[in-house]
């Protein structure tokens, strides 16, 4: 039976180190990949304040990642709703077998830039 809850496709920009500059700092490359069925929901006032106090960034949305996804999300850029967002903090994650729906990982995102 198909789930009644449906996510949206988002573009995740995975970060890869491709070399070093003349000062021995890493050079990064972003590789866009479309991830289907990502849930997006506004954060609560408490989450906004807690994240702002801990990271200095204002969380705007929670994104829920489908089970089985193996992309790296931490500190990456993600595009949805016509805007770019930065994944912040660490995920809340559950045990796949114990979660009844299609998602088992939740991240916070802040406006990119």
Image (tube, rainbow, N blue to C red):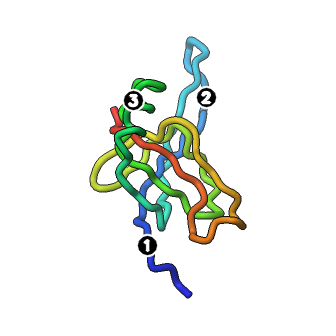
Between residues 45 and 21, which one lies in front from this camera angle? Answer: 45
Q: Residue at x 44, y 73 (%)?
A: 5
> Can you name the residue that lies furthest to the bottom here?
1
Q: Are marks 1 and 2 in contact (CB under 8 Å)?
A: no
At label 2, counting other C-alpha atoms closer than 10 Å, the crowd grade (few under 14, some 14-19, many 20 or more) is few
Q: Secondary structure at mark 2?
A: strand
**In this figure, which residue is indicated by the disc labeled 2?**
19
Which numbered disc covers residue 6? Answer: 1
Q: Determine which of the numbered discs, if any, sits on residue 36 in the image.
A: none
- Which circle, 2 or 3, is nearer the viewer? 3
- Alpha carbon separation for disc pair 3 and 1: 28 Å
Q: Is residue 108 above or below residue 98?
A: above
> Relative to residue 88, is residue 79 drawn left or right?
left
Q: Position of residue 15 (x, y in %)?
A: 54, 40
The number of discs equals: 3
Above/below status of 106 relative to 26: below
Q: Position of residue 22 (x, y in %)?
A: 56, 14
| Whole-percent x, y for residue 8 in the image | 40, 66
- Which mark is first along the chain, 3 or 2? 2
Q: Nearer the viewer, residue 23 or 103?
A: 103
- Compared across the picture, whether 64 is left or right of 24 comes to left
The label number, if any, that marks residue 57 in the structure image: 3
The CA distance from mark 2 to mark 3 is: 29 Å
For the N terminus, the image quarter is bottom right
The local crowd at label 3, few if under 14, some if 14 to 19, many if 20 or more residues have their Cα within 10 Å, is: some
Residue beneath the point at 44% across and 61% down: 39
In depth, the one of 97 and 35 nearer the eye is 97
């Amino acid at each position: 039976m198909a789930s009644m809850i449906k996510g949206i496709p988002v573009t995740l920009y995975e970060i890869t180190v491709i070399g070093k500059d003349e000062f021995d700092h890493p050079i990064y490359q972003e590789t866009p990949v479309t991830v289907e069925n990502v849930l997006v929901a506004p954060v609560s006032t408490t989450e906004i304040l807690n994240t702002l106090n801990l990271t200095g960034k204002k969380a705007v949305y929670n994104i829920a990642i489908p089970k089985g996804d193996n992309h790296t999300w931490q500190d990456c850029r993600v595009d949805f709703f016509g805007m770019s967002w930065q994944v912040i903090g660490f995920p809340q994650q559950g045990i796949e077998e114990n979660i009844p729906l299609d998602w088992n990982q939740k991240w916070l995102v802040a406006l990119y830039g």
